[in-house]
Amino acid sequence: FERIEAAVEVPAPLPLGAVWKLSGADARETDSRLGQRRTLRWRQAGFQASDWMTSWLGWTAGAAFERWPDTAQRPRGDKTRVAGRMLLAGGEWFDAHVTLEGWLGTPGATRASTEARLTRGAAGGRAMLAGGMEGVHGYTPVFIIPGAGDGNTRRPLLRAHPLIHDDALSVADGQILARRVFYGTAEWSRPLARVLFAAIDGTLFVDAAHGRQLIDGRLRDTQVDAGAGLRIRALGAGPTVRLDLARGLRDGRWAFTAGTVVGIPEWIF
């Protein structure tokens, strides 16, 4: 999976939201599910506006033009994407969103998603609980199908079952990639050490995901993973890097994954 993106955010020059975002993206995803490797490329140019109506309720709305690749079901085509997101925020301990997206064209598609995240102090550290669902309807090529993995190609976490294997999308080892995905994560972290300008935390976690109408033909499946890891963050600003070792509690699968820790984003695309 590769994605190159450029974006600029500016104060809204017109009375439509408080902040505007202009963005462009060029993405590629290699699919090996059908016995041969095929790289799908899609491009996007979009506009979004965002604002907070109160201290705890905000919104984002936008539109984008997308060029989809040839797939086994449909030839290459252009789509207009429209999307809206409602955001809830409760200080540093709670955030949530409900998002609706639609792709206009022949044929069209829709996607709905929601997620909530709760963070509180617990047992000398911090506990985080997150859960949500994603679902699609209509003609949906594989690159917009929901899934759970290591957090790099799809947002939901299932860290013993990464979706990318040998640089290509794979569902051969019980991965969850489906038209309906329900997921949840429980994570507890505690400071371990400070090294130069970085803080290191230790983490224990459990991920769970349930898929319905999986793209490999399974009607439904559930996986539960557990593991431990490290969080490395620069003191002050900057992303938090995560290193995780996880084991599937149902199938015994092991995986080591790396990525960054992100909250619920304000922007949709």
Image (cartoon, rainbow, N blue to C red):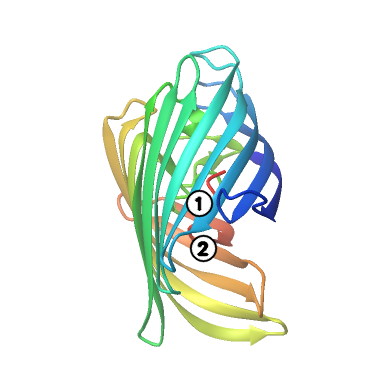
Within 10 angstroms of label 2, few (less than 14), some, or many (20 or more) residues? Answer: many
Residue at the disc numbered 1: 150
Q: Can you see residue 20?
A: yes
Q: Position of residue 207 (x, y in %)?
A: 37, 57
Total numbered labels: 2
Relative to 97, is 78 above or below?
A: above
Q: Residue at x 45, y 36 (%)?
A: 101
Which one is earlier in the sequence, the residue at label 1 or at label 2? 1
Disc 2 secondary structure class:
strand
Residue nearest the observer in this picture, 193 or 130: 130
Relative to 195, is 75 above or below?
A: above
Disc 1 secondary structure class:
loop
Q: Position of residue 240 (x, y in %)?
A: 60, 68
Residue nearest the observer in this picture, 102 or 166: 102
Q: Amino acid at mark 2?
A: Asp
Q: Residue at x 64, y 48 (%)?
A: 21
Cα–Cα span, label 1 and label 2: 9 Å
Which quadrant: the C terminus? top right
Residue nearest the observer in this picture, 239 or 17: 17
Residue nearest the observer in this picture, 8 or 208: 8
Q: Can you see residue 251?
A: no
Tag of residue 82: none
* 214 on left or right of 261: left
Residue at the disc numbered 2: 244
Which quadrant: the N terminus? top right
Q: Position of residue 8 (x, y in %)?
A: 71, 50
Q: Amino acid at mark 1?
A: Asp
Q: Residue at x 56, y 71 (%)?
A: 231
- Marks 1/2 in contact by CB < 8 Å: the verdict is yes
Q: Farthest residue toward the front?
A: 15
Name which quarter of the figure residue 136 lies in.
top left
Q: Position of residue 103 (x, y in %)?
A: 48, 27
